[in-house]
Image (spheres, rainbow, N blue to C red):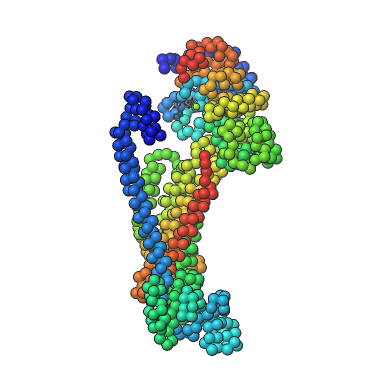
Amino acid sequence: MSVSRPGKSSSIAQTPAGSITSPQAQARIRRRQQVNRLFAFLTFTPVFLALSLLTVLFFDVLTDSVSWQIVEPRNSGQSFALSQAFGSRAVIRLELLAQGKTSEEIEAFFADAEALRKFKARNRVELMWYTADGPFRWIVSNSRDKRISDIGLFEGWGQRQELLASLKEGQSLYLNPWFDFSFFTKNASRTPIMAGLSSAFFGTLWVIGLVILISLPLGVGGALYLEEYAPDNRWTRLLEVNLRNLAGVPSIVYGILGLSVFVRLLNIGPTVLAAAATLSLLILPVIVMASREAIRAVPTSLRLASYGLGATKWQTVSKVVLPNAVSGIVTGVILAVARAIGETAPLLLVGAAAFVPYSPNSPLSKYTVLPIQIYSWVSENDAEFKHVASAGIIVLLIVLLVLYGFAFVIRRRFRRNW
Amino acid sequence: MTQTLAKDHQTIRTQAVAAEQAAIGLADFNLWYEDFQALHNVSLSFPKYQVTALIGASGCGKSTLLRSINRMNDLVPTVRVSGGVHYEGVDLYDPTVDPVEVRRRIGMVFQKPNPFPKSIYDNVAFGPRIKGYKGDMDALVEKSLRSAALWDEVKDKLKQSGLSLSGGQQQRLCIARAMATDPDVILMDEPTSALDPIATDRIEQLINEIKDNYTVIIVTHNMQQAGRVSDRTAFMHLGVLVEEGPTDQIFTNPKHQMTERYISGHFG
Ligand SMILES: Nc1ncnc2c1ncn2[C@@H]1O[C@H](COP(=O)(O)OP(=O)(O)OP(=O)(O)O)[C@@H](O)[C@H]1O
Ligand SMILES: [Mg+2]
């Protein structure tokens, strides 16, 4: 305070430590503040860069998942107001009426499961954000609709009057959100408009579910052994070093391991189980290390209290150590699993197929997973697959965000203040 | 430190404890951490239903001695011992003795209050639960909290975390927790060193109240505290038991010059 009031502090200024308020001191302060500002700026730059890149990514993916399309429909070409129909069945009924079918024919059609299945395999009920008839209307797209042109969200928005005017007889204009409900219910397809990620989504759920079942007990068990039971000798230290190195091994190496051990040697084949086993191996070192960290963070004083009350080793571990390490363990597991969800390379090796038109129904099913599905869409020639891939990326990001949110909540919920 | 002490020093004993009065007795007890000998030929008896204070400079082995009594030293892999610790006619270091059971009979209170991050109730119920207590848990929790003079302060918030209590209350909770396993002996390692004077006073009162039912052994660096709470005092120096006797004796008329210097605050 006295710095700003030199008159009052003159007595201080005359003491041996007199340079507290001298001009040199002022210069020192200014210099220090400059350095401070410089470092604040330098350290903020990477944060700013990361945030802006992330924003660009989200923006890019979101806008890419919507496009304007001019289509020559095979169906009636009519659109139906949101208020006219709820659910795909009602929309299909309207479409059939528009095609000139009678009510009896329609009832017979809905009663015939095979006919309905075939219809659904060729047609997709979509809520378009914009059509020639107005915003937010239902369309039943057909896989053999002739696609005339495909225009980006912003570009098309600027030209939409011209586009509407340029429509020829029998053509329609839609603003198509590729990321919609039917995207989740459709399986893989060669036709962009018919492609969905149902099989990849459930493939990922199956693989990750099994990964958790395999790696959680193994990882936590291993961590408990190393922290609580293993003797502190040369072998355990060697094990420790190796664990750290294993966590850094490129994932493709785990793919090769999984291919030769699980797929071939154990003869599990290119199945969900082989993928889960491979990914479990991949994240096991991470889980073990995170769990050890969490177990080690439980204060020794709590262990001593437990032993002092006559608890056995197992009672101490199960009633004191583990409950207090749960939050750290779960956080570590979730972060590791998030990594496994994004893995592509090792799964390509152990046989995830790019084109799997159905969801797995057992650990020995064939499968595909989200990142591989997205990869195959990105590498398709058809430009429309770009939108499908963007929609897929949105789903993958949402899945990861949900997981990270979960980790965050658990960390808050179980936070300890020793 | 200029004082030296022969390693074969004979402990000076005033009014030695008769064998039949002793709850616990150490006989020629030695303890090594790896190659470092932390206790040298300690022979010491702790009379039943009395408070014995262990005093001595930092690092002289008080905590080590205390932990030897309930075999907490077993948890340190490098520890070796020789000699015996006798409790109810049993040598606690006999291979047939179960250290877990020993710790249930000989409870321990630590220097820093260390309640579990669980409710007050669950803290007290921890010991009985792990030994499979089948009786009325509510009653046992209440009894233990009453014995630790904490019941009135916490009876309305038994479900709250033990960590929500003040330091002094936490330490009494730890005492209640130790009592809930129904021990005969309670070991206290500097139980008040992390507490303020008022909380310290509460604990000292508590020690005076419980000694009718428990044999208490307390390590303290506070000479006044040793004087206030203990019936007997043992003074240690560098792993050797220098002198032991009734507290009044030790404080007013110490026999060994080193005891006198330590008590009057000249070293330590
Ligand atoms: N786990 C251990 N490993 C090796 N040496 C130890 C260990 N614990 C204690 N020691 C050594 O044993 C000696 C006695 O230690 P102890 O903790 O019993 O002293 P203390 O009298 O309780 O001291 P303080 O008053 O500071 O608590 C010290 O020299 C200490 O360094
Ligand atoms: Mg100590």
Residue drawn where x is 62% and y is 39% of the image: B120
* The quarter of the displayed image where residue A337 is located: bottom left
From the top left corner, tell me how far across and down residue A43 is, in percent. Answer: 34, 48
B5 with respect to A318 (left or right): left
Quadrant that contains the N terminus of chain A: top left
Residue in the foreground of this view, choosing between A413 and B242: A413
From the top left corner, tell me how far across and down residue B178 is, in percent. Answer: 61, 33
Q: Is residue A415 visible?
A: yes
Q: How many marks?
A: 0
A51 with respect to A85 (left or right): left
Residue drawn where x is 47% and y is 30% of the image: B79
* The quarter of the displayed image where residue B97 is located: top right
Residue drawn where x is 50% and y is 37% of the image: A300
From the top left corner, tell me how far across and down residue A275 is, in percent. Answer: 43, 62
Determine whether A243 is above or below B111 in the image: below
From the top left corner, tell me how far across and down residue A169 is, in percent. Answer: 42, 87
Q: Is residue A277 visible?
A: no
Residue in the foreground of this view, choosing between B164 and B121: B164
Residue drawn where x is 60% and y is 84% of the image: A107
B105 with respect to A31 (left or right): right
Residue in the foreground of this view, choosing between B220 and A222: B220
Determine whether A80 is above or below A258 in the image: below
